[in-house]
Structure formats: structure tokens, C-alpha cells
Amino acid sequence: MAEIAVQRLTKRYGETLAVDDLSFTVDAGRVTGFLGPNGSGKSTTLRALLGLIRPTSGTALVMGRPFHELEKPVEAVGAALDAHDVHPGRSGRGHLRTIAAAAGIPNSRVDEVLDMVELTPARDRRVKGYSMGMRQRLALGAALLGDPKILMLDEPANGLDPQGMRWLRDILVALAAEGRAVLISSHVLSEVEQTVDSVVVIGAGRLVMQGSLADLVKGDRRPILVRSPQADELRALLVQAGASVGPDGRPDAMIVHRSSLETVGTLAAEHGIAIFELTHERATLEDRFLELTGESGNVR
Amino acid sequence: MNALKSEWLKLVSVRTTWALLVAMILIEGLTAGLVTGLSDVDDLRTRDVATLANGTKLAIVFMFTLGALLSTNEFRHGTANSTFVVTPKRERVIAAKLVVGLVVGIAGALLYIAVNAGLGLSILSSRGVDVDADTAVDTYLGVGIGLVLGCLFGVALGALLRNQILTVVTGMVLFLLAGTAALFIGNDVGQYFPGESLLALNGTPGADDVLLSQTEGGLVLGAYCVVLGALGMVLTRQREIS
Ligand SMILES: Nc1ncnc2c1ncn2[C@@H]1O[C@H](COP(=O)(O)OP(=O)(O)OP(=O)(O)O)[C@@H](O)[C@H]1O
Ligand SMILES: [Mg+2]
């Protein structure tokens, strides 16, 4: 059974379809990236999973049940929706204590968690004076209080510096390795690219793809740059194979569309053609992400 | 029980709570001292002991606000998210807030009475003005219960309206303005307004003909709290948190 199962989830706000017939699952033991541009419905989906909003139709299940039917919600799910959701006049420790008290968790666990998120030196200061990174740490700390089996974090990397990002990655990967299901949302793939094992990509409230990072690359349709001393021969073969080939400016190079790195490489090998360079013209996975979600539009 | 402890921590862990209580006591002490100390002695003799309960209308503002913050802070600062994720049985949260409101309301009322009676009554007796003990007890009981109910009213109205500014402004209008206007135009309905019920409960002198009796005032105000509180619980269960 998947830890998180979203089935045909739809949420309508007046004219806006925030989430549109969305289905996906999240398994334990891995970090899943929940990706989509601004306004694509990520936060809405998480809120539905947490029982904060009611689906217009469909279901959002956690450990096979609607959130409000969980026996011990804090032990099942730890969530961080928005790092700003703190009373600024409370100390970091005071904030966590209010949550711990509600969940029947002892204060000793609060200090333990503060240590984990490296906020101990600042724990008695009022949150008003916390930086964005510190607030993110505090929000993560709150999510960890109940030592939950599932973590749902909405844009946890927002506002983190490179060191903070690495720290977050290490902690999330470790938590997943302990057998937890970790779901983190982001609107930039590069932010979580090195953290996630699998991805759920949505656009305009609809599922664009679910799979591993490798799957995300597989359907790749980005233009390919090829350089070879037998350029003319290779060009003819590629055109024959259905690709479209354009000039690069250099006589020994070309830009290939409607093909894949694998196809070009194999074709060259089969005909004994030497390859000097074979790569996607635009090098980042981010472009692939933009390509996937691009058509679905942003602000609705 | 967990929800209760959490709500209590939320109350005592912000400075605003203490600031409101201290401000209420300071203003109350000042009014009680000034009225009893500076008024003409003959004038004081002819007036009722309820004159003492002078800062009540101001004190109720503080206690009401304290209660309102208890509920609306969750939405003002976004803590409603974690609160209702940790306690999905949302009516428990509101119930806990009402209990905490009751406790802090009683504490505030006791402080108020201690300052008002301690300062005011001793100044009066030093100036040779006798105070009828029965009337004093009635007055302080009324004022005390009024402050407690005012705080509960704030919690309940806040749970209902959620928006902090809207709640505080609505409370001010209900307690300070609405019924007063209705009474002036001789409307019987006016006496049942929260503000007028509170005045009746406080035993405001010389208003017997336009206001309810002290007991009736208390019951009406209490009924408001029960109805608003119940409504707040039901709506909090049903509404979306977003
Ligand atoms: N409470 C609400 N009332 C009305 N519309 C809403 C509400 N919540 C979300 N929406 C709309 O639903 C759509 C999805 O919003 P959502 O916050 O889920 O997007 P998101 O993917 O989290 O975006 P971001 O990356 O900017 O956080 C948006 O068009 C938004 O305007
Ligand atoms: Mg969002």
C-alpha cells in the first residue's frame, strides 16, 4: 500500500480548477519531488491530504485513510506548509512546545528536534528575529516532532542558502533511508534534483508525469548537439531515421531534433562513425521540466 | 487535555497577553484612584457604590480583546495549519480555547476586583464615605462575571469570524455602541444587546428602567457566549482552513 494515494482528486475554487482529476502515489523509503509551476495546485493537494480542505471530488488518502480518520495523526504525518506560519512573538522553542503539547509529546523531544534542525542556539529567541532559513528549519522541526512515517513539506528549500540546501538534502535522504515517505514540493526542479528519487510533475492542476528522475530524462525531446568527423554521413543516416537535422555553424557539428542521445549513439556505432561530442544542447534537466509544464500555464 | 495544555501555552507564551492584563490593571487602578480620590465627598456619598466600577467598560475591552486574540491569532499568524493538522478534531481546539478563556477571564476579573476594591474602597473609607457591603458584593460579582463573559465572548466571536481586526471591531461596536444607540431611540430590543446586558450585569446605577435586571443581564450575556461558542465549534469543524 502506498503511504500517500491521491485518486482522481479535484478541487474547485469558484471558476478556478486548482486541482483537476489528479492521481498519484508516494511510497515509503524514498524522497518524492512534487513539482509544478506557481499556481499549479501543489499546496492545494497537500492541504487536501492533510484534511484542511475538502476535495470537490476524488480522494486524498494517507496510509489508506482520509487524514481525519488516522488514529495518531502526528505519528503518521509530519507536515510543514509555510515557514511563515508562526506567531512572531513566540520563541522557536515556545512555538514547538505548543505543538508538542497538543500532540502529547514531551518537551524533551522539542529540544531534541531543535538540535536536529540546528536551532538550539536560537531556540529562546523570538521568531520575529529569525531569518527565512531559520524559519524553514523551525517548520521542519515541527514536522519532525512526532517522529512521523510520512513527511509532507511544501517548498522546504525556499529561502535556504547553498549550505542549508545541502543540509536539507542530507537530512531528507537520511529520513527516507529510515523507511519514511518524504514528499517535498518545489516549483524549481534544480532545487530538489539532487535530493529526490522520484518525481510527480503537475501543471494546471493536472498530472504531467510520475516516475523516477531517469523517467523524467527518458522522454527527453531537447535538441541534441553532435560533433563527428563523418558529419555528412551521420546526417544522412539521421534524416533517414526520421530525425530533423540542422546546422550548428561548425562544419563537423549539427543540431538534431526529434531523436534521443541513445538513438544517435547507437546509429553511429552501427555504422562505425566516430563521435567527438554527443550531448543535449541545453544541458540542464530544468529545461526538460519547463518543457513538460510549459504548456499548462502558470497563474490562473 | 492535550489541546487544553497547548492552548494555555499559546496564551502565556506571548507578551501581548501580559501587556493586556497589566494595561487593564493600570488603567483600572488609575480610574478607581482618581474617581474616589478627587470627586467631591458629598457627591460620592449620594452616589451608588457602583460608581466604583468605573473602568468596567474599558476593562471589558481588554478582556474581550484577550479572548478574541486567543482565537484569531491562529488565522492571523497561520498557526491554524499546524493546530488543525495536529488536532483534526477541530471542535476540541475551540473547546480548549473557551476553557482557557474562562480561566484567564476569572484571573482578570479577580485582579480587577482586587485593585478596584483594594484601592477604591480604602480611599473611600479614609475620606469617611460609608459603603453598603451588600451592594458592594453585588456590584463586584456583576462586574467580575461581566469580565469573564466578555473574555469568553471574545473567544467565541473570534472562532466565528476568524479575522482579527473584524472580530475586535465587531466586539467594540457590540459592547460600546450598538445597544446604546438602540436604547436612545427607545427600542426595547436594545436592552438585549451585549453592551446593554453587560451594563445591566454590572449594576449600572439609575438605569433600572431601561436595562434588564442584573441577573437577567448576566443570563443574556451568558446565552450569547453559549450560542456563539457552539456556532464557532460547528463552523470550525465544517469550514476549510486555507
Ligand atoms: N483558498 C483559495 N481560494 C481561491 N483560490 C485558491 C485558493 N487556494 C488556491 N487557489 C487557487 O488554486 C490554484 C492552485 O494554487 P496552489 O496554491 O495550490 O498552487 P501551488 O502549486 O502551491 O503554487 P505555488 O508554487 O505558487 O505555491 C491557484 O490558481 C490559486 O489561485
Ligand atoms: Mg504553494
Image (cartoon, helix red, strand yellow):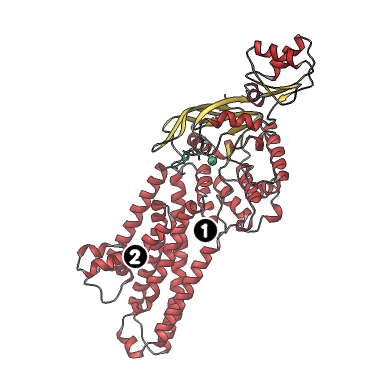
Q: Position of residue B73 (x, y in %)?
A: 49, 55
Q: Position of residue A1 (x, y in %)?
A: 57, 24
Q: Are marks 1 and 2 on the same chain?
A: yes
- Mark 2 sits on what residue? B175
- Judging from the image, mark 1 belongs to the subunit labelled B
Q: Earlier in the sequence, mark 1 or mark 2?
A: 1
Give the number of the mark in front: 1 or 2. 2
Residue A151 is at least partly visible in this image: no
B103 or B171: nearer the viewer: B171
Q: Residue at x 52, y 31 (%)?
A: A203
- Judging from the image, mark 2 belongs to the subunit labelled B
Using residue B239 as the reference point, say whether residue B13 is left or right of it. right
Q: Residue at x 26, y 67 (%)?
A: B181
Q: Residue at x 59, y 29 (%)?
A: A291
Residue A159 circle label: none
Placement of A142 over or under A283, stated as above or below: below
Q: Position of residue B52 (x, y in %)?
A: 37, 78
